[in-house]
Amino acid sequence: MKGGQKAKSVKLTTTGIQILILVVTSAGDGIDYDHADWANAKFDVTGPMPEAIDAPVEEKVILTPRPGPAPKLNNPLVFGTRPGNPFIYRIPATGTRPMTFAVEGLPKTLKLDPASGILTGTSPDTRGEYAMVFKAGNASGQDERPFKLVVGDTLALTPPMGWNSWYIHYNRVTDAGMREAADAMVASGMADYGYMYVNIDDCWSKKRKDEPYRDNCGGILTNEKFPDMKGLTDYIHSKGLRAGIYTSPGPWTCAGYMSTLGYEQLDAQRFAEWGFDFLKYDWCTYEISDEKALHDYMKPYALMGEILKNLKRDMVYNLCQYGMGNVWEWGAKVEAQTWRTMGDVGFMSFLDAGLENCQYAAYAGPGRWNDPDYILIGWVGDARKMGEGAPVNLTPNQYYQYMSLWTMMASPLFFSGDMTRLDDFTLNVLCNAEIIGVNQDILGRQGVIVTQTEDYFVITKPLADGSIAAGVFNTSVVEQSVRVSWKELGLKGRQSVRDLWRQQDLGTHKNSIDVKLPLHGVVMLRLSSAK
Ligand code: GLA
């Protein structure tokens, strides 16, 4: 109902009902202004009075076993780069340090630091596939894993992973905050699972009215919180991580800071000289004619895409224009690797965002990813107030749903909460190698919803080795048991089933499997044909 409407009487036969739950859900148009006024609602009761019960408490249960002391390599099997460009890559591996790394088949243009596992140098000049084997050893054992460097035109052969400053720092972002995040990415172990981009969002350039915005040559100036951009990216690179920056094709960024209009080439070049490896290009104040023709939407993005492609530096290109003009249909044409498919996730529920993003599955693939925005778990600042960090308003099981859904959608995995307040639980949700493995699978298919009822939905994602991942998400208000059939998953015959969050084999099953879903819960499975 809408405000001002006349009261409606609702009659519900409660005979035989043992538990009655009154729920307020999203009206399907975002969560703004969704609330319930129960007004004078009452139950007329005959017989014994109903008893009010508390909602079940969800404990922060760590499902994933901690990695052992022996090395375990977690790199994606492929990685794209353009020929002859600066290259930096930290081989992701868990296990006790010190650890010694080696690489078989390392191209001559690259150098390995055996103690840190950081590769530096330039990518080979000649296009082609460079097959390598990463090796890691320590006192407890060793591991090896193939890695194929694909030198060509396509970046982000698997979804990019990292952290972005927006939802925790907003306009408070500083050089020190970025360095701290880079430190934490390594210290927390996130980098050992493949998180690699450390990205500044809005608010690093000069604010409107704080002139001059540019130097005498037109070069964009930073504000006082970023005294030395090159120094900052050097620092991030020294850890084997990559750095990202943000601007808008309009005159001002969304938060009212200087941006790029009319200086596209100059700014992109400066970003490259500063050493940035990722650009988020946010529509914000860009203006087009009322016609709003498709080419109007594409124009600013095509312009920057062409510039980035020709820079002597790999810069992953992330479009942010909230899905206008069906960006998923043309993002790849303007040389982007990822594009936001809708508005800011900070203003909606992650489930609404995810379910919306699921519609565009057909457009995703290696080097072209639908971006439903960041992973907001742990400590996050309220988007409406650009607030200071606080524990996000999600239950522990919703943390698992959030990460599972982003994984299944082959979404870029960007955490945007506080890197310095990562508790064990949050970290465990962000860092399960088998879950991330589904996201980083080299087939690069986005999962599709195969079953959706009022109470749950099932997404499946085919994987490169012929197995499939299946996620079963509880959207009801109670715990439930769900039978998932091979028919709905498109499978036949006996299947070996693995529980990915627990990293446990569940044995072989015929025709179907029953899964238990706690309130807000999810089960993530990998199914492969049992020979
Ligand atoms: C827009 C974007 C957000 C963030 C802010 C910064 O709202 O969608 O992701 O970058 O701008 O002002």
Image (tube, rainbow, N blue to C red):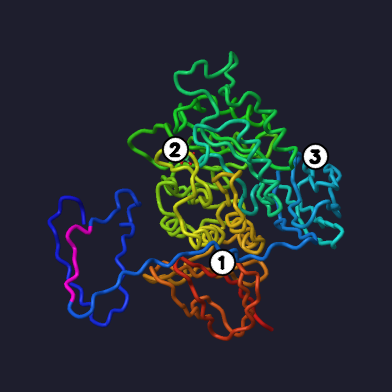
First-in-chain label (2 vs 3): 3
Which quadrant of the figure has residue 209?
top left
If the image is split into quadrants, where does the N terminus sit?
Answer: bottom left
Q: Is residue 263 magenta?
A: no
Secondary element at tag 1: strand
Residue found 62% across the figure and 36% down from its top? 178
Mark 2 vs mark 3, CA separation in Å: 39 Å
Mark 1 vs mark 2, CA separation in Å: 35 Å
Residue bearing the label numbered 1: 461
Secondary element at tag 2: loop
| Amino acid carrying mark 2 in the image | Met
Residue bearing the label numbered 3: 121
Which quadrant of the figure has residue 136?
bottom right
Considering every residue shown, the one lying at the far top of the view is 216
Relative to 255, say whether 421 is above or below.
Answer: below
Secondary element at tag 3: strand
Q: Residues within 10 Å of mark 1 (few under 14, many from 20)?
A: many
| Amino acid carrying mark 3 in the image | Gly
First-in-chain label (1 vs 3): 3
Please name which of the two marks, 1 or 2, marks the residue nearer to the observer: 2
Question: What residue span does the magenta drawing correspond to?
Answer: 38-45
Q: Residue 114: x percent and y percent? A: 86, 48
| Amino acid carrying mark 1 in the image | Lys
Residue bearing the label numbered 2: 386
Residue found 31% across the figure and 69% down from its top? 52
Please name which of the two marks, 2 or 3, marks the residue nearer to the observer: 2
Q: Is residue 40 magenta?
A: yes
Magenta part, dominant SS: loop
Q: Residues within 10 Å of mark 3 (few under 14, many from 20)?
A: some
Q: Disc 2, disc 3: CB below 8 Å?
A: no
Q: Residue 475: x percent and y percent? A: 41, 66
